[in-house]
């Protein structure tokens, strides 16, 4: 399974990036830079317990994060983790700032690169005068209640998820079940989409005017797509499928709720299979049918939507997952 990367240049149109706020920031490593860290399993643990060892580049980044808060007293780092090829940190902007978030992040990236060049003057970064980071950064904004803790837990658990992906690739192919409201659902694809701290349930009535607060919900779904969150839905009607397609186009994750089963021999058709392989899709199946039904009743659609809403409300690491 490969990692996918959504745009790192889009910002929320309706948000004041000078305001008091909490963000989860992600920055990717430039391909020519050594890894930020190495992550290995603890040999003394019977569980998947990661040991994170910072590289020289990772140590420079951590030091620059400390300096960032010194240079901009309104900023606080609540949690940070340097992964091999990217860094996450939860940033609390405690009061309104003169500079926008983008300017402060640009200064941070520049400081990291300058410090790396100073310590390693003969490195490729120094000789070719490039940044240690790829252009741009991703920001997830704590709009919802509980987002602060969700960001914190997601960042904390990132090394464990990395190890599980590396050590147990079979977890992504028919080996697990999700328990949701006492119902066992089969899983196919990237189970760690369940842990994304920004998940949104997509449901639009066939008569759009009957959907409560539709304009606000559309803004929520657009923000989820922008920040690289996950849309959760059966995506039954054409209006919902438009958001499904927009999410795929922009690199967003999808949790698709279906009612038909998969087997080791029968995999999702090509588009869904490719999305699973890219880590962008999790299919949650009630496994009521062997094949996709030709028609769906209103009651049955509501059942699938109820499951989707419950999954979207799950905090990171709250899903009950069992091996088959």
Image (tube, rainbow, N blue to C red):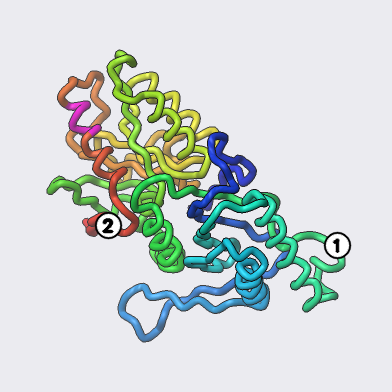
- The residue under the point 50% across, 76% down is 52
- The residue under the point 31% across, 59% down is 317
Q: Residue furthest bottom?
A: 44
The image shows residue 120, relative to residue 186, as above or below, that is: below
| Alpha carbon distance from label 2 to label 1 | 45 Å
Q: How would you rate the neighbour count of disc 1 (Cα within 10 Å): few for under 14, some for 14-19, many for 20 or more? A: few
Frontmost residue, 300 versus 214: 214
SS at circle 2? loop
Q: Residue furthest left?
A: 182
The number of numbered badges drawn on the structure is: 2
Q: How would you rate the neighbour count of disc 2 (Cα within 10 Å): few for under 14, some for 14-19, many for 20 or more? A: few
Frontmost residue, 225 versus 184: 225
Q: Position of residue 12 (x, y in %)?
A: 55, 39
Residue 35, visible in the rendered structure: no
On the rendered image, what quadrant is the C terminus found in? bottom left
* Nearer mark to the viewer, of 2 and 1: 2
Prevailing secondary structure of the magenta residues: helix
SS at circle 1? helix
Q: Is residue 158 magenta?
A: no
Badge number at residue 128: 1
The image shows residue 231, relative to residue 33, as above or below, that is: above
Residue identifier under label 2: 318
Q: Earlier in the sequence, mark 2 or mark 1?
A: 1
The image shows residue 244, relative to residue 185, as above or below, that is: above
| Residue 232, quarter of the rendered image | top left
Q: Is residue 198 left or right of residue 84?
A: left
Q: Position of residue 243 (x, y in %)?
A: 44, 28
Span of residues in magenta: 300-305
Q: Is residue 103 left or right of residue 150?
A: right
């Amino acid at each position: 399974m490969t990692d996918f990367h959504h745009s790192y240049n889009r910002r929320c149109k309706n948000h004041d990036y000078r305001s008091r706020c909490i963000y989860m920031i992600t920055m990717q490593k430039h391909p020519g830079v050594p890894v930020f860290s190495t992550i290995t399993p603890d040999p003394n643990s019977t569980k998947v317990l990661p040991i994170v060892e910072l590289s020289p580049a990772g140590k420079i980044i951590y030091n620059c994060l400390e300096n960032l808060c010194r240079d901009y007293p309104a900023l606080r780092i609540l949690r940070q983790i340097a992964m091999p090829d990217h860094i996450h940190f939860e940033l609390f902007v405690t009061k309104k700032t003169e500079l926008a978030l983008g300017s402060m992040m640009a200064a941070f990236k520049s400081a990291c690169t300058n410090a790396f060049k100073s310590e390693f003057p003969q490195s490729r970064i120094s000789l070719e005068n490039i940044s240690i980071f790829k252009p741009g950064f991703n920001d997830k904004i704590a709009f919802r209640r509980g987002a602060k803790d969700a960001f914190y837990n997601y960042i904390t658990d990132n090394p464990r998820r990395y190890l599980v992906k590396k050590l147990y690739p079979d977890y992504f192919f028919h080996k697990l079940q999700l328990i949701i409201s006492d119902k066992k659902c089969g899983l196919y694809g990237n189970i760690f989409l369940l842990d994304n701290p920004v998940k949104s349930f997509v449901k639009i009535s066939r008569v759009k005017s009957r959907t409560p607060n539709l304009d606000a919900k559309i803004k929520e779904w657009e923000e989820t797509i922008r920040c690289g969150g996950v849309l959760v839905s059966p995506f039954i009607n054409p209006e919902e499928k438009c958001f499904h397609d927009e999410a795929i186009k922009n690199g967003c994750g999808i949790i698709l709720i279906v009612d038909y089963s998969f087997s080791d021999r029968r995999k999702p058709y090509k588009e869904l299979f490719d999305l699973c392989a890219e880590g962008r899709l999790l299919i949650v199946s009630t496994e009521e049918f062997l094949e996709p039904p030709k028609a769906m009743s209103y009651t049955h659609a509501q059942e699938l939507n109820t499951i989707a809403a419950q999954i979207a409300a799950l905090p990171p690491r709250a899903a009950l997952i069992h091996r088959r």
